[in-house]
Amino acid sequence: MKRAEPIKGINLTPLIDIIFQLMIFFIFTVKAEESTLTEGIKLAMAPNGQTVTKKDPREIVVEVSADGKIRIQRTVLSTNVFHSVMAKAVSEYRSDLPVIIVGDSTVQHKYVRKVMDICSSVGIWKLKFMALKQLE
C-alpha cells in the first residue's frame, strides 16, 4: 500500500488568476447607470472637442480624482491593482482596448500621467479623455 505524500504548500497562482478574472468580469459586465461618474468629479470644459457618437462596449472608464485616487466603476484601486487589472484586460481583449480617462478639472497632471503610463506599460494605446462640451 502506497502512502500519500503530505501537501507541502499551496500554489496561489490559480487563485490569483481567478480573482483577477472575476474582477474584470464584474467591471465589464456591470450595467452602468446613466451617470457612472463619482459625484465629486467635476469635468473640465472642452468646447472644441469631438462629440462621441459610437460607444465601444469594451471601453474602460478610469476616473482620476483631484487627490489622485484611481477608480473604475466607483471602486478605488491602488496603482498595483490597476496595473494588474489593465494587464489582464489586455490579455483578454487585446491592446486596442479603448480607455477613457476622466479627470477632475482640478486634478494635477502627474496623477493623470500615472494612469497614462500604466496603460502604456501594458500596451494600451487607445486613450481618450472625457470633458464637457458646451451645447450650441
Image: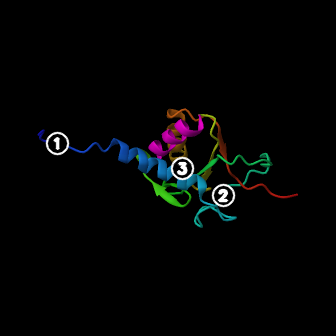
Residue 108 visible within the image:
yes
Q: Amino acid at mark 3?
A: Gln
Q: Amino acid at mark 1?
A: Lys
Residue 30 in the figure: left or right of residue 12: right
**Label 2 – label 3 distance at C-alpha:** 13 Å
The residue indicated by pointer 1 is: 8
Q: Is residue 116 or residue 4 the one in the foreground?
A: 4
Numbered badge on residue 35: none
Q: Which residues are magenta?
A: 82-94
The residue indicated by pointer 2 is: 43
**Label 1 – label 2 distance at C-alpha:** 53 Å
Q: Position of residue 45 (x, y in %)?
A: 72, 54
Q: Is residue 122 or residue 51 the one in the foreground?
A: 122
Extreme-front residue of the structure = 1
Specify which label sits upstream in the sequence, 1 or 2.
1
Q: State the quadrant of the N terminus.
A: top left
* Residue shown at the point (59%, 35%) measured from the top left: 94
Residue 6 in the figure: left or right of residue 10: left
Q: Position of residue 90 (x, y in %)?
A: 55, 37
* Residue shown at the point (48%, 52%) measured from the top left: 22
Q: Is residue 37 magenta?
A: no
The nearer-to-camera label among 1 and 2 is 1
Q: Is residue 85 or residue 25 the one in the foreground?
A: 25
Specify the quadrant of the image occupied by residue 134.
bottom right
Q: Amino acid at mark 2?
A: Leu
Numbered badge on residue 108: 3
Q: Position of residue 53 (x, y in %)?
A: 80, 48
